[in-house]
Amino acid sequence: MTSTTFDFVIVGGGSAGCVLAERLSRCGAYQVALLEAGGSGKSPFVTMPGGVAAMMHNKRLNWMLRSEDQHLRAGKGLYTPRGKGLGGSSAINAMIYTRGAPSDYEHWASVSSADWAWPQILERFKGLERNERGADAFHGDQGPLHVSDVEPFYEVSKRFIEAAVQAGIPHNRDFNGADLYGVGAFQFTIYKGERFGTRRAFLEPALERPNLTVFTNAQVERVTFKGQRADGVLIRKGSQHEHLKAEREVILSAGAFHSPQLLMLSGIGCPEELRRHGLVAVVERPAVGANLQEHVDVLVHYRNAQKDSLSLGPIGLSKLAGQTLKYLRTRDGALAHPPAEVGGFIRSHDNVDTPDLQLHLVPTRFDDSGYDLTAAFRHGFACHVCVLRPEARGRLYLHSKDVRTAPGFTYDFLQNREDRSALLSGVRQIREIMDQPAMAAHNGGEVLPGKTTSEEELLERIYRHCGLIYHPTSTCRMGNDKDAVVDAKLRVRGVEGLRVIDASIMPRVISGNTNAPTMVIADVGADFILADAAKVGT
């Protein structure tokens, strides 16, 4: 078996991994390896903002996971797309740029350290972004990440904002400004009509550095240890194995599913879980894989009386063909626009202070978190409503000690009264918006969940049709308590030389889309790593 030595070995070339690769290689003093189980992450559909649906079944770019919740979707569980390839989920997501609420980060700080408090985190967001609105108290314009306003393309998106205002919800022109509450157009990681994910923003500018080595199609099988210190990783490339040594640290940035899977395969996890698969424990850490959080979501479907939105029927496909040619020529038109152009943050009940529901309006219909596109063959539109701070806590577990076997997991959505009540409130508020005069020309009638005679019947339909909004977090929870997987500096508790730096460390999922916060987690984590490296070097 061959062996190569680096200072830092980063496992996972997604949103966190790309930021870490850039930050840790920037000074030139350290040899950095970035390992990605997928490929380059490049595709015409990745570049094209409107090409998201084409990646829902693309095994080259998508891990295509599915939960094992027996009580949801008639036992089918929930389809869970996750990015595979450089850029990770930033290469297949809807490109929405939101940060969550200040109170999210204050909660993180309360269970870890002041490094995670909102004033410090806000400066991180500002430092990373190059916002086309310019620099102000909430935005930066000197960072590597392009953040853009994209004028809504579909008429139903524009009418939705008007209707929500008619329903009494304020028009919010900046969800990353002073207040989260309201409806409006999102900002996006799009630049000049193209997706601008973390591969383009952070990794590509660093690829010319001689001290950064990127391995693609390199499946990490486990972290290796010398005593209680991580000293490298064992990788598989085809039928060959290689040991990459880490003189300073191994960093897991493989996301909320694969980072805890790798910890368990490396002997860090619940002792019963390890024994079940014949794995030798390096350190017992029962919370690895626990605390799984997501934004449970339901789509409220409507027929489109104007038939002017996105359809996969014969006429719709012919229009898409024309729009594809237009996009390839000019980087303009329908496919230069993201799938969810507008939305909002609202409150489930009057006693809620910070919005606890998020809306995403999409100019088409689909089911099963995008896996089932059958409904898109008919003219329609739909509005997501998701619970931003759910009480539900799921768990991830192993099905095999072979890393190539996907882990099992359950979300355990809708098992508690609070989440059910919030989601029902969201459906009622969507219906109120759709009944406003601004939506009259488009609203051809609700299809799903459909008119019901009782809340019990509505809940039963939600159980059959609920989904998620692609924000899994918290399976390697950060905290100062003895049960936390990583400490406030993201070091795995009980061992040395090993950190987890990705969305899995969130103590609680944030109140919004998770991609931008994941980049900030990596930026903060890079400072921790570099500070410790400087201490060792002195």
Image (tube, rainbow, N blue to C red):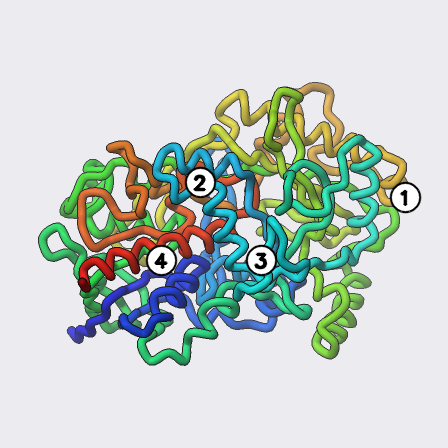
Q: Quadrant of residue 420?
A: top right
Q: Residues within 10 Å of mark 4 (few under 14, many from 20)?
A: many
Q: Disc 4 or disc 1, which is closer to the eye?
A: 4
Say which element carries label 1. Answer: loop
Q: Are marks 3 and 1 in contact (CB under 8 Å)?
A: no
- Separation of marks 1 and 2 at Cα, in angstroms: 46 Å
- Separation of marks 4 and 3 at Cα, in angstroms: 20 Å
Choose the circle earlier in sequence order: 3 or 2: 2
Say which element carries label 2. Answer: loop
**Label 4: which residue?**
526
Circle number at residue 493: none
- Separation of marks 3 and 1 at Cα, in angstroms: 40 Å
Q: What is the number of callouts on the image?
A: 4
Task: Check disc 2 and give the amino acid type.
Answer: Ala
Choose the circle earlier in sequence order: 4 or 2: 2
Seen from the viewer's position, the closer of residues 228 and 279 is: 228
Q: Are marks 4 and 3 in contact (CB under 8 Å)?
A: no
**Label 1: which residue?**
441
Q: Are marks 1 and 2 in contact (CB under 8 Å)?
A: no
> How far across and how far down the image is residue 405, in percent?
33, 54
**Label 3: which residue?**
140
Q: Are marks 4 and 2 in contact (CB under 8 Å)?
A: no
- Separation of marks 4 and 1 at Cα, in angstroms: 51 Å
**Label 2: which residue?**
117
Choose the circle earlier in sequence order: 3 or 1: 3
